[in-house]
Amino acid sequence: MDFEIVGSIREIQPIATGTGIRALTRLNRQYGRGKWRKLKGFAAVRLLDGTVHTAEIHWYEAHGIGKKEFKLKLPLLD
């Protein structure tokens, strides 16, 4: 990751679940079988240059496996 999540993620909402996830086969192969969900939320992030911004974050999550593959979605909100 080229950013660090500072604090907690808020306003978490599901984007896709189960077969609605395009990368489901890859996730099962790479991290193990699970009930995968793609989620989004907002969090304060610290970029490589040290600045802190509020941004939308997307990630995959499965029970017993945890949160994987965080993605920073632009534009950043200040």
Image (tube, grey):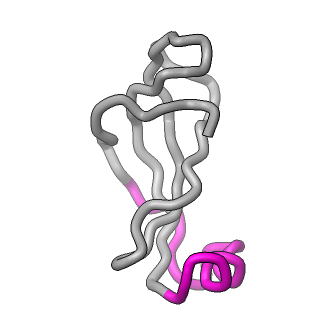
Quadrant of the image occupied by residue 64: bottom left
Residue 26 covered by magenta stretch = yes
- Residue 48 drawn above or below residue 24: above
Residue occupying image coordinates x 46% and y 26%: 45
Image coords of residue 71 (percent x, y):
60, 45
Image coords of residue 19 (percent x, y):
60, 84
- Residue 46 drawn above or below residue 68: above
Image coords of residue 76 (percent x, y):
56, 22
Number of numbered discs overlaid on the protein picture: 0
Image coords of residue 67 (percent x, y):
44, 61
76 displayed left or right of 53: right
Residue occupying image coordinates x 48% and y 71%: 37
Picture quarter with the N terminus: top right
Q: Which residue is nearer to you in this view: 64 or 9?
A: 64
Residue occupying image coordinates x 36% and y 29%: 6
State the extent of the magenta-drawn residues as a range. 13-33
Q: Which residue is nearer to you in this view: 78 or 61?
A: 61
Q: Identify the residue at the far bottom of this view.
A: 33
